[in-house]
Amino acid sequence: MANWFPPDLNPDAHIIASETGFTNNQIALEFLQHYIKHSNAVPHSEWKLLLMDNHGSHETPEFIKLANDNHILPYPLIAHLTHCMRPLDVGVFQPYKHWHDVAIKEALAGLDVEYGLRSFLRDLVWIQEQTFKKSTI
């Protein structure tokens, strides 16, 4: 799978694959450790709010303790009510979907007729650069 990832992928990106293809408790802890590192969360820093879904891996004692020890407040969104989060949907997710769609159309125009995971990972850096600008966020 290593050849799936483009060479210009952000060096701070952390990609983890599980045997099942789904997240699990260990992956959730590794994600939280990555978040702690890149958000400068430490025991005496300002508290940070981490919005999450209701996956069980975000509710384990290890996850909650690691978050609290680093002044991170894990806040699970209410199941089936994320549509109420319209500002995120319009301000961030809509532009992300737009640039992803542009990448797909450009790939198809270049005869990349099987736009799969490899194509997505190849285009991910560009999609993120187009989406996550100061004006968008």
Image (cartoon, rainbow, N blue to C red):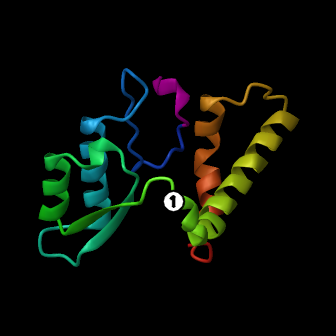
Q: How many marks?
A: 1
Residue at figure coordinates x 80%, y 26% from the top left: 113
Image quarter where the C terminus lies is bottom right
Decide which of 1, 60 is in the foreground and name it.
Answer: 60
Left or right for 97, reference 36: right
Percent position (x, y) of residue 118?
61, 30
Residue extending furthest right?
109
**Residue wearing tag 1:** 81
Quick check: 137 above or below 6?
A: below
- Amino acid type, callout 1: Leu
Percent position (x, y) of residue 78?
42, 59
Left or right for 12, reference 132: left
Residue at figure coordinates x 32%, y 61% from the top left: 38
Classify residue 99 by image quadrant.
Answer: bottom right
Instruction: Label 1: state its secondary structure.
Output: loop
Classify residue 109 by image quadrant.
Answer: top right
Q: Does 3 appear in magenta?
A: yes
Q: Does 44 appear in magenta?
A: no
Left or right for 71, reference 39: left
- For the record, the magenta segment spans 1-6
Percent position (x, y) of residue 60?
19, 45
